[in-house]
């Protein structure tokens, strides 16, 4: 049979360069109207009984080339269970791996995907839970809904939102874990949180980019996490509607959930450098990270981003803008495309299940200090 390579599906992204014998050469396409690229997701048909070597040949020009060393491609034959290709290697700008085909179809991705179908199922199921209300905050440029789930009766206003960068699906896996915990009527932690706080949950802030198979941008080629200072209906309606909803409720605690290409660890980034910085506000951020690291081996505080100098925070980024605008304890949670090196899983790397478990740990940590926020 002739080998077929396809990415014409939800979150698909790849371009076939050529097939020579058992070697398949590929390129990752750029986001629409953008130079960003790194996310890939494709399927292979017609290779049963063969062992193929895959080569992504344009990695050197990708958005984060430092993300390839130490990275392992994700592989699935049923789209449910995803493992890593153990022989993944990066050299001279080319990512390579092999796969022995024992099935008619195999799927490959930069990370375990989270499709829009799964998003719709997650939101629909959550709205059936007691005490949960759904709002459509707005529409994207492609006409997709920005879904927001609200639950809880407490005075503290907590915003959890994910996937500003669509090619970071671990963020929505994290949101699935958070939603499952918070809607569990039998869970004591969830009950305590719902009594003390009102939660606003936006599982996917960039559904257009998610469906289109983008790494970092929306349908207009715009990086949403550089729009929070001045979002517009024409370029960034996703941020405009979420920030407007935040203005209506206020924000006491916020977590913007992401994935990081290069750092093999889970970590949080804060809001150092905002004009209104206070040591008291910063101490709450630091204490949350300290408690989370003590609570789970899947989190650490040694690795992370450099801190902004006083007065130099980029207010176009959500964590800085939300901390400055509302005086909130705001943070960006970053999870790896590689693995959590301090607590690795050679078979799966960092994956959806571990992202969901980290969400539970984050909420359990928040429950222990919600009165202090």
Image (tube, rainbow, N blue to C red):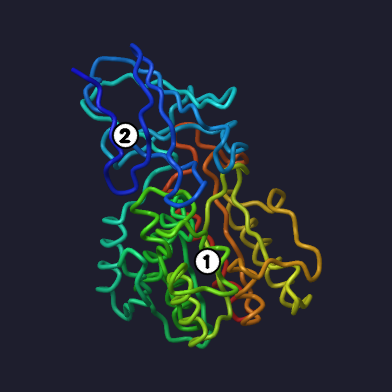
In the picture provided, is 104 more to the left or to the right than 259?
A: left
Q: Please tell me the numbered disc located at residue 364.
A: 1
* Above/below status of 202 relative to 152: above
Q: Which residue, as the protein is rendered here, is positioned at the far top?
A: 21
Residue 313 image offset from top left, x and y in percent = 72, 67
Quadrant position of residue 317: bottom right
The quarter of the image holding the C terminus is bottom right
Front-most of residues 159 and 313: 313
Residue 266 image offset from top left, x and y in percent = 59, 50
What residue do we see at 47% from left, 68% from top? 236
Q: Secondary structure at mark 2?
A: strand
Residue 228 image offset from top left, x and y in percent = 56, 71
Which mark's residue is nearer the viewer, 1 or 2?
2
Q: In this figure, which residue is indicated by the disc labeled 2? A: 107
Asked whether the beta carbons under mark 1 and mark 2 sit within 8 Å of each other, the answer is no
What residue do we see at 42% from left, 50% from top? 32
Quadrant position of residue 324: bottom right
* Above/below status of 10 relative to 205: above
Quadrant position of residue 205: bottom left
What's the CA distance linking mark 1 and mark 2?
A: 35 Å
Crowding at label 1, few (<14), some or many (≥20) Cα neighbours within 10 Å? many
Q: Earlier in the sequence, mark 1 or mark 2?
A: 2
């Amino acid at each position: 049979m002739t080998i077929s390579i396809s990415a014409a599906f939800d979150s698909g992204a790849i371009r076939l360069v050529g097939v020579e014998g058992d070697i398949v050469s590929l390129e990752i396409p750029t986001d629409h109207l953008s130079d960003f690229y790194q996310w890939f997701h494709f399927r292979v048909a017609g290779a049963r009984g063969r062992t193929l070597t895959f080569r992504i040949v344009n990695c050197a020009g990708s958005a984060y080339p430092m993300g390839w060393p130490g990275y392992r491609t994700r592989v699935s034959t049923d789209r449910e269970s995803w493992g890593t290709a153990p022989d993944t290697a990066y050299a001279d700008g080319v990512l390579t791996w092999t796969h022995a085909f024992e099935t008619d179809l195999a799927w490959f991705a930069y990370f375990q995907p989270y499709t829009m179908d799964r998003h719709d199922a997650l939101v629909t199921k959550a709205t059936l839970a007691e005490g949960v209300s759904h709002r459509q905050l707005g529409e994207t440029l492609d006409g997709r809904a920005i879904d927001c789930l609200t639950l809880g009766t407490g005075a503290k206003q907590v915003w959890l939102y994910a996937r500003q960068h669509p090619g970071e699906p671990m963020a929505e896996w994290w949101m699935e874990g958070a939603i499952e915990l918070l809607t569990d009527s039998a869970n004591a932690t969830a009950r305590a949180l719902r009594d003390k706080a009102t939660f606003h949950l936006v599982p996917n802030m960039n559904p257009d980019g998610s469906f289109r198979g983008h790494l970092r941008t929306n349908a207009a080629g715009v990086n949403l996490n550089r729009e929070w200072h001045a979002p517009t209906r024409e370029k960034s309606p996703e941020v405009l509607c979420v920030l407007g909803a935040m203005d209506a409720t206020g924000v006491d605690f916020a977590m913007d959930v992401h994935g990081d290409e290069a750092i093999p660890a889970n970590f949080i980034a804060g809001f150092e450098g905002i004009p209104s910085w206070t040591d008291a506000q910063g101490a709450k951020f630091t204490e949350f990270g300290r408690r989370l690291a003590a609570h789970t081996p899947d989190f650490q505080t040694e690795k992370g981003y450099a801190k902004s100098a006083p007065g130099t925070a980029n207010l176009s980024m959500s964590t800085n803008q939300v901390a400055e605008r509302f005086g909130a304890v705001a943070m960006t949670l970053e999870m790896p495309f590689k693995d959590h090196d301090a607590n690795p899983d050679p078979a799966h790397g960092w994956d959806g299940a571990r992202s969901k478990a980290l969400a539970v740990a984050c909420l359990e940590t928040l429950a222990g200090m919600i009165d202090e926020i």
